[in-house]
Amino acid sequence: CSGVAKCITGIVTRVIDGDTIKVDGQSIRFALSSAPELNEINGPESRVFIENLCPVGSKVTVDEDDMQTDGSYGRIIGVIYCNGVNLNEELVDSEFGVISSKFCNMSEFADSIWARNNGCRF
């Protein structure tokens, strides 16, 4: 993990949707990455995409975003690493997610190659 915010290692206990999972019961929201809601086009597919990359029971590491430690609706905001991949990056590189560019100026991860390649520009 980078920065000074939390670095969490745990087990995926639930995939809520394409950009939120639970790790040891704690909700984690993908930093900078956004998927459609479950009732929207590609919403269910985005959840299945994440479930396939990181099924319930998988071990993950969450790097909490240093610039968003207040969270969002009780969720920790961070980058999730699972089975050797960055889930945030995989989501936006797929057809199932996009960069939430309105958060680029308030995320420690905005200067990451994957974030810049998908829309975070300064």
Image: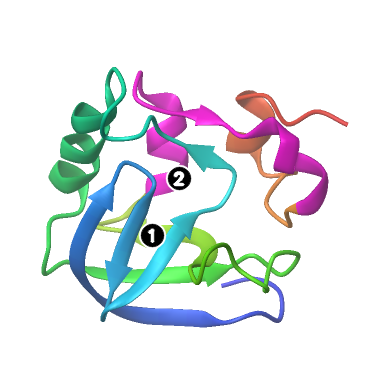
Mark 1 and mark 2 in contact (Cβ < 8 Å)? no
Mark 2 vs mark 1: in front: 2
| Residue 91, placed above or below residue 67 | above
Question: What residue range appears in magenta?
Answer: 87-106
Image mark for residue 111: none
Answer left or right for 50 relative to 89: left
Q: Amino acid at mark 1?
A: Tyr
| Residue 93, placed above or below residue 77 | above
- Which is more N-terminal, label 1 or label 2? 1
Q: Residue at x 63, y 25 (%)?
A: 117
Image mark for residue 81: 1
| Residue 10, placed above or below residue 105 | below
Where residue 43 sits in the image (x, y, percent)? 28, 29
Q: Nearer the viewer, residue 86 or 50?
A: 50
Q: Residue at x 46, y 39 (%)?
A: 89
Answer left or right for 24 relative to 4: left
Q: Quadrant of the N terminus?
A: bottom right
Where residue 121 sits in the image (x, y, percent)? 80, 28
Task: Write down the residue under mark 2.
Answer: 88
Q: Amino acid at mark 2?
A: Asn
Q: Could you classify mark 2 by the number of other residues whose Cα lies within 10 Å: few (under 14), some (14-19), or many (20 or more)?
A: many
Where residue 96 sits in the image (x, y, percent)? 34, 25
